[in-house]
Amino acid sequence: MARKPGYSRRLRNLAFESNMSVYTLGERTRRWIDRGFTFVESAVYVALGVLLAVAATMLLVSSTVDFFAEIAFSQLDSHVVTLLGRLLLVLLIAELLYTVKVSFSAGTIVLEPFLFIGLIAAIRRVFVLTAEFSDAGGGEQIPFREFIIELGALSVLILVIAVSLWLLRKSTTYEDRKNRPVRIDSNDIDQAGGG
């Protein structure tokens, strides 16, 4: 049986096309799985954002109602620590909500909001700790030694987080400057060339 001219070329093209369809099927499957994970990740971020918004709103409303109730009954002095802790917790939840929004928008986890959350949490603890220590009407006072140790550790933590934020912003600014495209006008070339 005689072969037709170009038979081997057609056979090679058919083999190449079948390999391409297998490659395309693998690529399609990978894209489909990637889209599925992206959808699940987005759904989790949205659900987390909604829950954080509801929690922050409920805590803020509850704190506002308690604040006005304590003012009405002249008991604000004894509940300042609790009120301050709640308001800083609302601020912490709001920062968490911002972190979720940034992570959802950027498609990646951004370090800076997490550092802000840590900074707010440490400052909140310092406020609550000092208010508890100075509260004379409280039942059980924390010992002075434990107060100083915790306050010192929190101060060091705040300093480390603040320096980390400063270094992060400084490095981001440098990277932005380094990656910014350089624009050269024709006037610059004329001036450099003496023309």
Image (cartoon, rainbow, N blue to C red):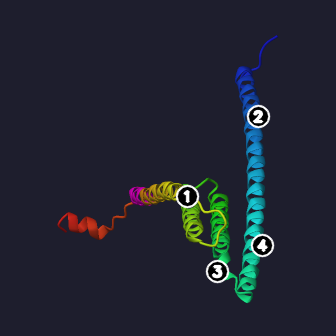
Residue closest to the far top: 1
Do callouts 3 and 1 mark residues in contact (Cβ within 8 Å)? no
Mark 4–mark 3 distance (CA, rounded to whole Å): 23 Å
**x%, y% of residue 186?**
31, 68
- Which x, y percent locates residue 5? 73, 21
As drawn, is 156 to the left or to the right of 49?
Answer: left
Tell me the residue that label 3 is attached to: 77
SS for callout 1: loop
- The numbered mark, 4 or 2, whose residue comes first in the sequence reads 2
- Which numbered disc flags the more N-terminal residue, 1 or 4? 4
Give the residues in magenta. Answer: 169-178
Q: Give the number of the disc on residue 67.
A: none
User: Disc number at residue 21?
Assistant: 2
> Where is the N terminus found, in terms of image quarters?
top right
Quarter of the figure that contains the C terminus: bottom left
**Up/down of 3 relative to 84, above or below:** above
Going 76% across and 76% down the picture, which residue do you hit? 62
Residue designated by label 4:
58
Rounded to the nearest angstrom, the CA distance separating label 3 from label 1 is: 22 Å
Of tags 3 and 1, the one toward the viewer is 1
Q: Is residue 115 above or below residue 78?
A: above
The total of numbered circles placed on residues is 4
Callouts 1 and 2 close, C-beta under 8 Å = no
Q: Quadrant of residue 32?
A: top right
Q: Residue 105: x percent and y percent?
A: 65, 61
